């Protein structure tokens, strides 16, 4: 079976997985700090950052996109502590936050090598 | 008491409700003398604004007071500083009676309002810091103060009179019909208790909110629970500043990280483990590890330490298939603070089953702490090899804390098999 490498940069662990594996299946076992609540794509808690290999992940569904949008405001609030909210907001708009660098770990499947980190 | 409104100023009236018999609030809070749900009416030359409402059961008091200060068709604006049902219970009925009134909520309340009213097409305006509404000769200005204590919370400031409608911030559960802080009985304990249980988990957000609030001239703070603070209002802001700040200055350097190792032991085995783990962690440059025997203190004391710490390990023996009560008490106390993202782990000696470690780990994982390592479990007395295992565990925990752990590559099947083994 074809393999892919998933690297969790926060714990510095790389897992060799069969293609099609979801991030949720392995992130807790390696102790990565990607947190979960509902585990089925509703709550948006398991948001993570794609550092490398977004092209090697399953396409983003309409439902996942909606949840990411709902989380957007909350994330912004969390990052308010950075004190430079305007710069952050501009950066996120520039970089097309949704579907590009951030995904839900319970939804995203891996089809090639990726590097991920908790947000 | 007659259900008449109470004047805060020439244009502002309290139209809230008294709930003197409430004893247990939101399940988690106690109150020896009830609470109030404070709502306010602001009259401008162009209409009336209602700021917050009350719990559904107390709606009669609210409407009776509201009717004494304004006709429903005069209400131009309804402002919701917080959508929790104790402040929005009377909202659906108010919207029926004053259908022309426009709803103003914070940006983070937009999904919540739909779920609250079970109505997808509800009309509202979402506002953030700096947005204003004019009532003619009176202006209401918004402050975005999220997570105090829900994502949606905000404050509203009446510019011409320097009155801050603060929502739950600066509130407390204390019912006294004399209403004002210079008239009511001694409510200081209630103010402190409310901060400790409601606001403390959101300390970073309190600090952000204070940065918005402190520059404002304040004559009166009008919260949604408890006394209206018109005498020395800024002293209550200062108290929040103190409570959200550090206590004694920390002696830990900026480039160091702290690891707190809590343990409790029946026959000394878990104590031995804790000491070795500490020694292992201390081998990593930058780690400041400390040991605390839970038998010599309680969670109220320890929780202050945990709040400031970077990592927490808990050692518990297994007794009757469970971790021991002091360990659970400590973990329960984490709900009072923010532990999200802190490094955590568990370890312990056991006689014949040894479930405590995994149970503690699962609970801390559930609190969204970061558990990169599987904790050490040792049957009965630790051997030299097992103590070396503890030292290594401490060292690896320290390395994770400092972000210097060595890279590792593992196959998924091996990884999941090892997890299964750990759980069984």
Image: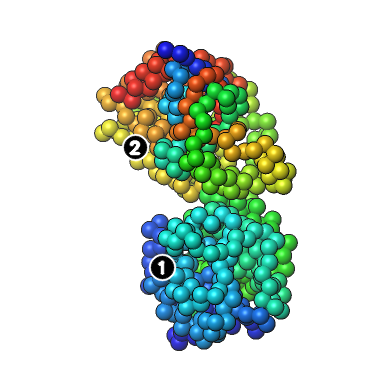
- Does residue A91 appear in the picture of this structure? yes
| Coloring applied to the structure | rainbow
- Does residue B261 appear in the picture of this structure? no
Specify whether B138 is left or right of A107: right
- A41 shown above or below B373: below
Which residue is the site of mark 1? Answer: B32
Q: Secondary structure at mark 2?
A: loop
Question: Can you give x and y, in whole percent of width and height, for residue B107 in the image?
Answer: 59, 56
Question: Can you give x and y, in whole percent of width and height, for residue B245 in the image?
Answer: 63, 50
| Chain ID of residue with mark 1 | B
Q: Which residue is depicted at the point 38% across and 58% down? A: B27
Q: Secondary structure at mark 1?
A: loop
- B245 shown above or below A5: below
Q: CA distance from mark 2 to mark 1?
A: 32 Å
In-front residue for pair B420/B323: B420
Q: Which mark is residue B324?
A: 2
| Chain ID of residue with mark 2 | B
Question: Can you give x and y, in whole percent of width and height, for residue B55 in the image?
Answer: 43, 69
Answer yes or no: do the residues labelled 2 and 1 have beta carbons within 8 Å? no
Specify whether B13 is left or right of B173: right
Question: Can you give x and y, in whole percent of width and height, for residue B234 in the image?
Answer: 67, 66
Specify whether A7 is left or right of B375: right
- B43 shown above or below B346: below
Q: Which residue is depicted at the point 44% across and 22% down? A: A20
């Amino acid at each position: 079976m074809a393999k892919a490498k998933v690297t969790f940069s926060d714990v510095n662990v790389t897992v060799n997985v069969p293609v099609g594996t979801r991030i949720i299946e392995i992130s807790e076992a390696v102790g990565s700090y990607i947190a979960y609540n509902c585990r089925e794509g509703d709550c948006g808690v398991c948001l993570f950052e794609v550092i490398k290999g977004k092209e090697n992940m399953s396409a983003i569904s309409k439902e996942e996109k909606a949840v990411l949008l709902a989380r957007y405001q909350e994330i912004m609030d969390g990052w308010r502590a950075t004190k430079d909210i305007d710069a952050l907001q501009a950066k996120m708009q520039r970089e097309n936050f949704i579907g590009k660098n951030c995904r839900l770990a319970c939804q995203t499947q891996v089809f090639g090598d990726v590097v991920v980190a908790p947000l | 008491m007659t259900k008449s409104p109470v004047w805060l100023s020439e244009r502002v009236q309290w139209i809230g409700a008294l709930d003197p018999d409430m004893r247990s609030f939101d399940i988690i809070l106690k109150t020896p003398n009830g609470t109030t749900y404070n709502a306010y009416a602001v009259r401008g030359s162009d209409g009336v604004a209602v700021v917050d409402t009350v719990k559904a059961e107390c709606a009669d008091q609210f409407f009776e007071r509201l009717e004494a200060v304004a006709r429903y068709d005069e209400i131009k604006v309804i402002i919701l500083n917080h959508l929790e049902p104790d402040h929005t219970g009377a909202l659906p009925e108010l919207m029926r009676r004053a259908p022309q009134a426009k709803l103003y909520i914070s940006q983070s309340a937009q999904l919540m309002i739909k779920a609250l009213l079970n109505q997808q097409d509800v009309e509202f305006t979402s506002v953030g810091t700096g947005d204003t509404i004019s009532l003619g000769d009176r202006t209401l200005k918004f402050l975005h103060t999220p997570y105090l204590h829900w994502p949606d919370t905000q404050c509203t400031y009446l510019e011409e009179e320097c009155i801050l409608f603060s929502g739950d911030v600066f509130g407390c559960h204390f019912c006294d019909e004399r209403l004002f802080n210079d008239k009511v009985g001694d409510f200081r304990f209630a103010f402190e208790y409310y901060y400790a249980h409601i606001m403390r988990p959101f300390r970073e957000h309190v600090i952000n909110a204070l940065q918005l609030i402190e520059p404002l001239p304040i004559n009166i703070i009008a919260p949604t629970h408890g006394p209206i603070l018109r005498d020395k209002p800024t002293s209550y802001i200062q108290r929040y500043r103190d409570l959200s700040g550090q206590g004694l200055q920390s002696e830990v350097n900026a480039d160091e990280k702290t690891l707190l190792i809590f343990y409790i032991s029946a026959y000394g085995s878990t104590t031995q483990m804790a000491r070795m783990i500490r020694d292992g962690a201390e081998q990593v440059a930058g780690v400041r590890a400390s040991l605390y025997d839970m038998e010599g203190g309680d969670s109220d004391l320890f929780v202050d330490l945990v709040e400031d710490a970077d990592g927490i390990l808990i050692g518990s023996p297994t007794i009757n298939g469970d971790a021991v009560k002091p360990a659970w008490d400590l973990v329960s106390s984490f709900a009072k603070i923010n532990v999200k993202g802190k490094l955590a782990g568990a370890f312990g000696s056991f006689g014949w089953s040894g479930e405590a470690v995994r149970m503690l780990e699962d609970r801390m994982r559930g609190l969204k702490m970061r558990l990169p390592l599987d904790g050490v479990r040792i049957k009965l007395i630790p051997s030299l090899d097992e103590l070396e295992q503890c030292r290594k565990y401490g060292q690896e925990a320290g390395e994770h804390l400092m972000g210097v752990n060595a890279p590792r590559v593992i196959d998924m099947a091996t990884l999941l098999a090892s997890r299964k083994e750990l759980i069984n």
